[in-house]
Image (cartoon, grey):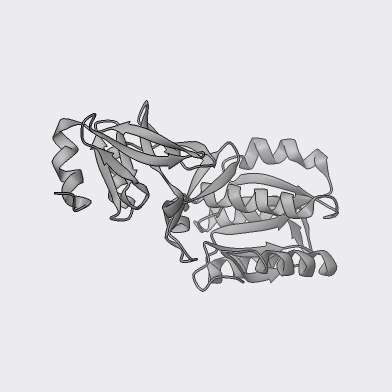
C-alpha cells in the first residue's frame, strides 16, 4: 500500500489461491488502495465483509460453498451495506444475471485470466470504485507533494495539480474549465464552490474567471487585465471593476 490513508479498503473474494494472491499483491501496490481482507469460502467471505466493512469488493462468481450472488443476497438479508463491486470472472454468461439482479452494486467486470493490459484494467477498476464511492474530495485531499484534485473524464479520473492551474473559467451549466499550460478540463462545479476548496493563492478577477496569483506576470493597468504565461505567450484576462482593487491588494500593487 502506498498511502497511510487509503481511499479504497478492498476485500478480495476468489477461490483460486494463485489468482487471489496475485490480485491482492497488485492492489496493494496501487496508490490509495489497501486490501483489508481476502477469502475463498462463502462463509469466510461473509464474515470478512462484516468485520472489515470495506468500501470496495473484488468478487469472483464461484466460491467454495456458494457463489457471488448468494453472498450478495446474504449481505442484503442481514442488512449489511454492500460496497461497490468489481465482479471477477471467466464466465461471461453470468453478466446478464448480474446486471439484472445486482446492477446497482456491480460497477465493473474484471475478466480472468489477468494477463493482457492488466495494469490499465486494474486502474480503470480503481477509478470507477473511487467515483462510485464519491471519493473525489478525499482523493484531492491526499498528501503527495502539491495539492491536487481529480476531474472525471468519462470513465477516467484526470489529476490536476492546483499549482499548475493558470486560471478557472465558467463553462456554463454549473461547470467550470480548469486551465493549465497543457490541458483544459471541465468539472461540474460552480466557480463560487470551487473557490472555497482551492488554496488561498487563487483570486476571482471577474464574474466568470479566477486566477492563480502565483502565475500572474503583471497587471495591465490601462486595459485592466492580468497577464499570465500560456503556451509560450502571454494571456490577457480582463479584470472586472468589482474585483480590480482586491486583486491589486492581494498582489501588493500600490
Residue 239 lies in quadrant: top left
Judge by depth and name the residue closer to the eye, 201 or 63.
201
Which percent across, then down, holds residue 189?
37, 38
Question: Against 3, is 118 above or below?
Answer: above
Question: Against 133, is 173 above or below?
Answer: above
Q: What residue is rendered at 45% in x and 55% in y?
A: 148
Which percent across, then down, holds residue 63?
77, 60
Q: What residue is rendered at 81% in x and 41% in y?
A: 92
Would you say 158 lies left or right of 116 here? left
Tally the marks: 0
Judge by depth and name the residue closer to the eye, 200 or 15.
200
Which percent across, then down, holds residue 54?
55, 63
Q: What residue is rendered at 54% in x and 41% in y?
A: 182
Judge by depth and name the residue closer to the eye, 5 or 18.
5
Which percent across, then down, holds residue 22?
79, 67
Q: What residue is rendered at 50% in x and 51% in y?
A: 133
Question: Against 194, is 12 above or below?
Answer: below
**For the view shown, which residue lies furthest in the bottom direction?**
4
Q: Quadrant of the N terminus?
A: bottom right
Judge by depth and name the residue closer to the eye, 225 or 39.
225
**For the view shown, which residue lies furthest in the front direction?**
222
Amino acid at each position: 500500500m502506498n498511502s497511510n490513508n487509503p481511499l479504497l479498503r478492498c476485500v478480495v473474494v476468489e477461490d483460486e489461491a494463485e489468482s487471489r494472491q496475485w490480485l491482492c499483491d497488485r492492489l496493494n501496490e496501487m496508490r490509495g488502495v489497501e486490501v483489508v481482507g481476502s477469502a475463498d469460502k462463502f462463509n469466510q467471505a461473509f464474515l470478512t465483509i462484516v468485520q472489515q466493512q470495506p468500501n470496495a469488493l473484488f468478487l469472483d462468481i464461484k466460491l467454495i460453498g456458494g457463489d457471488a450472488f448468494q453472498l450478495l443476497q446474504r449481505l442484503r438479508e442481514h442488512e449489511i451495506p454492500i460496497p461497490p463491486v468489481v465482479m471477477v470472472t471467466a464466465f461471461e454468461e453470468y453478466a446478464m444475471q448480474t446486471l439484472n439482479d445486482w446492477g446497482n452494486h456491480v460497477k465493473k467486470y474484471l475478466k480472468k485470466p489477468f494477463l493482457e493490459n492488466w495494469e490499465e484494467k486494474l486502474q480503470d477498476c480503481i477509478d470507477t470504485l473511487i467515483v462510485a464511492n464519491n471519493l473525489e474530495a478525499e482523493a484531492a485531499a491526499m498528501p503527495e507533494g502539491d495539492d491536487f484534485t481529480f476531474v472525471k473524464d468519462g470513465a477516467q479520473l484526470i489529476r490536476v495539480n492546483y499549482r499548475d492551474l493558470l486560471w478557472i473559467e465558467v463553462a456554463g451549466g454549473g461547470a467550470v474549465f480548469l486551465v493549465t499550460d497543457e490541458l483544459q478540463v471541465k468539472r461540474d462545479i460552480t466557480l463560487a464552490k470551487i473557490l472555497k476548496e482551492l488554496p488561498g493563492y487563487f483570486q476571482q478577477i471577474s464574474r466568470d474567471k479566477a486566477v492563480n496569483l502565483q502565475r500572474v506576470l503583471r497587471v495591465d493597468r490601462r486595459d485592466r487585465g492580468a497577464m499570465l504565461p500560456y503556451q509560450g505567450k502571454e494571456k490577457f484576462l480582463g479584470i472586472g471593476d468589482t474585483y480590480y482593487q482586491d486583486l491589486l491588494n492581494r498582489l501588493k500593487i500600490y
